[in-house]
Structures are given as structure tokens and as C-alpha cells.
Image: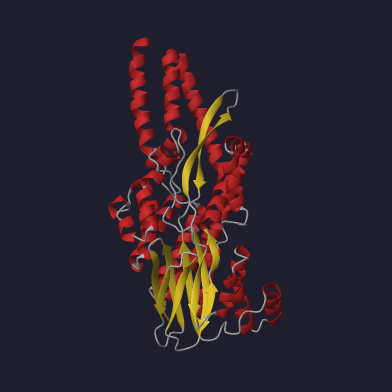
Amino acid sequence: MARNVPTLIAALLVFLLPAGCSSLTSYTLMTQQARLSISQGRFDDALTAFPEKSARGKDEVLIRLERAVLLQAMGRFTESSREFQLAAGKIGQYESRAVVSAGRTASQAGSLILNEQVQPYEGEDFEKILLHAMNAVNYLMAGDLEGARVEIRVAYRRQNELREKRARELEKAEREGRAKSWEQSFQKADSGRYRELSSRAGNVHSVYQNAYAYYVSSLVYELGGELDEAYIDLKKGIQAAPDSESLQKDLIRLSRNLGFYEDEQKWVARYGEPDEEYGVGTDVFVIFQHGTAPVKEPLSFPIPLPGGGLAFASLPVYRFIPSGTQAGSIGVGGRDVRTSVVSDINAIAARNLLDEFPVLFAKQVARSILKAQMTSKLSREYGAMGAITGTLASAVTEQADQRTWVSLPKEIQAGRVFVPEHTGSLTVTSIPGGHTAVVDIPEGTRHLIILCRDTDAGLALQTKAY
């Protein structure tokens, strides 16, 4: 048997180490230059980091999401919509595959033996919802209200589907008993990271209630003359973003327009009376995005194994990237109206990760047990060399999956003003950075949508008049 040791070692290393290492390339490092280009407003340069030909294999969904955001920022809405649709379709294939194919079996086995990165990227739950809200904006900017309505309906359905799916996964993890100690293990490994995640996630009631999606939906319905439906979605939106002044003012405006006197009095008592000009004249709706979404880094810590012994887990944690911008300001006729947050990507991502940790931890424990059993068997059959090989293979292949949608902004804010008819222009300004852009209002406009992303180079603006 001793003569077989070198063959065994070589075979194991040839199979495990390249397979593991090939999946361990840090997405955070890979996208560093692209993220720098985005922060500098060079979306075309960033797009070259995610070429169409790279949207294949296990990272197809992620690459298409990155491309979709960049194309939208460049005003290429039809192309952006195509990328979102292809990403959503691929996610649906992954989720609905009832019969496990041979390739899927290999992928699942690989994730159990190696790490999560060998599996196709399906998107975080909040990403799966947000992509439909963002695609609805593509249709709005292209003047296609029906297309926007379809995307909003899909966003609603996905919120319910994903909430139920997550509940089943958590129940399974708790039933198997492998996820119980994740919180204690995380706090012992890095209490600072745990506190930061918990603090940022504190204001998010649920990742399955997205205020941005609700506000965009409300706008779609209002543009279509369906004020009742618009009002319903505003009420949902204020639950997810109770501090959004724009949502607050629109609740008062629509409840008043619809003749809902009791609702109107309730909202006025809670939020105060909006300015007299609010609701009169040309409607200007500003979507203001700034900063950079968080990236993932690995956090390694020991976990106890059944029957004694320890294994080292490696799970992803977020690193949050500060932004010097606080809000946008809409200036017209001597008035300045600030935008307010409707989607804090940092907070939503933190909440999503904390909700996912029990499931990730349960998988980690199962993987560690298998690797410990493999190492033990190698030790019994091949002695010290077998034990060293098993330990080495376990260490090299155990790395956190750092893939995440990095081209998203740090925050999505919204602001709304109503300007007198025949107003020719207004300004959008970043606060406190002072980047300012003048936006023309075409004559005869009833509704104007301004899509804006703040960068170090200034404001990237796209407009659509209705």
C-alpha cells in the first residue's frame, strides 16, 4: 500500500487543489479596477471588465447584472433591459430545475467538498428583487409603461416567493441543528464585524419589502392614471422606508386627491403639511444614486466538530465603502428640495447576509464534517502523509464565496418637486460635493423623470419627459 501513497497524493492534489483554487479567485480583487472606473464616472471603461463573452458559465448571472447597471447609467436602456431579462431568466432556470441534471449533481457535490464558489451564482435575494425594480426604470426611461408594469408585477411575485423559500431553508437548517452556534462563532471570530453588520441591518425590517420597487411602481401607476393602485404602493413603500420625506409627501398628496379624508388627516398629523406648491404644475421625479455597494471579504474562524476536534470555516462578510455624498438637491425657482433614501443598499445587503448566515453556516458544518472524515480515512490508510494531504486539501479549498453585485450604488434616493408650467429648467446638485447639472424641461411636459448617478467626475444624468 505504501507504494500507492505518492499516486494517491498526486491524484488528490491534482483533483482538489486546481479545482479549489480555480474557484477561489476573489471577485472583490477581480473587480477593483471596474469599481474605480465607476466611482470616476467612466462607465464605458468599467463595462470592458464585464464583456458580453464573459457572461457564460457559473458567473453568467452576475456578469449580466453588472452589465445591466452600467448600460443603464450610460442611457442604453434597451441593452440594459436585455441584460436584466437574461439574468432573470437564468436565475429562473436555476431555481425551477426540478430534475437534477448530472452537471447540477456535480456542482452540488463540488460545493459540499470544495466551497460555494463552484456553484452558479444565482444572486442574493435582495438582488433578485432589485433587478426587476431597476428594469422597470429602463422601461420608464424608454417610454414603455406596459413593460414597466410587467416588471413591477414580477417584483411583487418574487418578494413573496423568495420570502417563503428563505423561511423553508431556515427551518431546515434549524431542524438539522447545524446552524445553532453560528452567531456565537461569528462574534468570537470578529465581534466588530458582527456589530457593524447588525447595526447597519437594524433599520431594515425585511429584504422582501423594497421601498424603491414600491415607489417606482407607484410612479408607473400614476403615469397610467391609476391613482388608487399608486396610493396602495405608497403605503407599502412607507413601511419599508418610513423616513423618506418624498414618500411622506406623496401619501398626503394622493390621499387628498383621492378624497381619503381620514387617511389624509392621519398622514398630515404624522408628517406635517407639505408646501402649497406640492402637487401643482409639472411633476419632476428624481432618482438619485451615489456611492458604491459593499464588497465581500472572507472571515475565517474555528467551529467544533461532532465527536471532538475543530475545523476552520470561511464565510463572507461585507466591507462597506464610505461615500462623501449625503443626498441630492433639486433646485428650482429659489427652492431646494433634498432627495431621501428609498433603498440603502448597505443596510439591505447586511440584513440579507445576516438572514442567510444560518444556512451558510449549516452548509459549512456539513462540509467540514465530510472533509474531516476524508482526512481521517487518509490518515488511517496512508499514515502521516495521508493526514497531511487531507489537511492541506481542506485548508486550500475552504474559502468564502466573495461574489456580489458590485456595480450597484451605495444608496438609491428619490425626490419629487412640482414646478410651474412653462418652467424651462432646474438644477440637480450633490450634497455636500457640489456637483451640479442643469436639466432642461421640454415645453408641454407633464411628468419628467431624471435618473442620476453621482460620481467623482460629476453627475451622470438621463431624462425622460411624458
Q: Position of residue 3 (x, y in %)?
A: 34, 11
8 shown above or below 466: above
Q: Looking at the image, which is closer to me, 331 or 310? A: 331
Residue at coordinates 60% horizontally, 23% vertically from top-left? 307
Residue 149 shows in this picture: no
Image location of residue 462, percent across then percent down: 39, 71
Give the residue drawn at x 44%, y 57%: 408
Which quarter of the rendered picture does the C terminus lie within?
bottom left
Residue 320 horizontal/vertical position (percent):
50, 50
Image location (x, y in percent) of residue 382: 42, 14
Q: What is the quadrant of residue 44 in the picture? A: bottom left
Q: Image quarter for residue 46?
A: bottom left
**Side (left or right) of 40 relative to 160:** left
> On the rendered structure, is 255 left or right of 390?
right
In the rendered image, the vertical position of residue 376 relative to residue 82, given as above or below: above
- Name the quarter where the N terminus is drawn: top left
Asked whether residue 8 appears in the rendered view, the answer is yes
